[in-house]
Structure formats: structure tokens, C-alpha cells
Amino acid sequence: MLWDRRRSRSFTCSDMHLYSGSCIHHAMEMWKILLICLLMLPVFFVLNYLVVVYMARSRREREMRVERFVGDSVGSDYRARRFVTRRYRPRRR
């Protein structure tokens, strides 16, 4: 494909009249986009905080469940005298 001068030129403000009517219109669109982004920033921080709190709470609950399960398991083994300790060790014959 041969080099085409029409395709290689940059998109300038003078070409924007084809799409919106004026270059000022696009400048206003940019500040509106920036304003929306700045206004959405606190919303992002609040949602991020809520997600972190939820994840910390679920992790804490999961750890408590594991500790409770392990404690119940060890307690039942001690009650059933399954551990060989000095106190419960059978005599040698």
C-alpha cells in the first residue's frame, strides 16, 4: 500500500468541526469528564473501604471457625484419652 498523505496528517482542532461543530465544545467535554472523575474519586474510596472491612470481617470469622474446630477436636481427644502423655502412658511389661 502506498503512503497516503491524507491518512498521515494529524487530527487537529480544525478537523473537529466535522464531528461537533467547534473545538470549544470538546474542551468543555474534557472538563466535564475531569469533573466527573474527581467527583467519583470519593465514591471509589468509600467502596474500597467497605470492601476492605467486609474482607477483614470474613477473614476474622473464618479464623475463629478454624480455631473453634481445632479446639473442639483437641478437647474431644483429651476427653477420650487418645493422647499418650506421662499421665496416661500404659505400663511397660
Image (tube, rainbow, N blue to C red):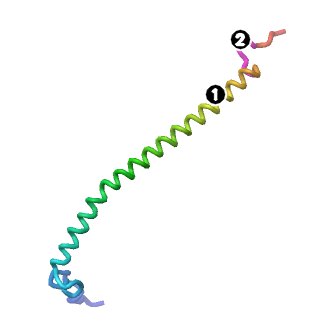
CB atoms of marks 1 and 2 within 8 Å: no
Q: Residue at x 59, y 31 (%)?
A: 67
Q: In the picture, residue 92 is in which quadrant?
A: top right
Q: From the viewer's side, name the closer residue of 64 and 88.
A: 64
Residue at 24% x, 63% y is 35
Residue 78 appears at what percent x and percent y? 71, 21
* Highlighted magenta segment, given as a residue range: 82-88
89 left or right, relative to 38: right
Secondary structure mostly taken by the magenta-highlighted segment of the chain: loop
Sequence-first tag of 1 and 2: 1
- Foreground residue, 22 or 7? 22
Q: Which mark is residue 86?
A: 2
Q: Residue at x 22, y 83 (%)?
A: 20
Q: Assign a secondary structure to mark 2.
A: loop
Q: Which residue is mark 1?
A: 71
Q: Position of residue 7 (x, y in %)?
A: 24, 86
Verify whether residue 19 appears in magenta.
no
Quarter of the figure that contains the C terminus: top right
Q: Give me the disc on residue 33.
A: none
**Crowding at mark 1 (Cα within 10 Å: few <14, some 14-19, many 20+):** few
Corner quadrant of residue 1: bottom left
Q: How many marks?
A: 2
> Who's the residue at 39% across and 50% down the image?
48
Q: Is residue 86 magenta?
A: yes
Percent from the top left, x then y, of residue 26?
20, 76
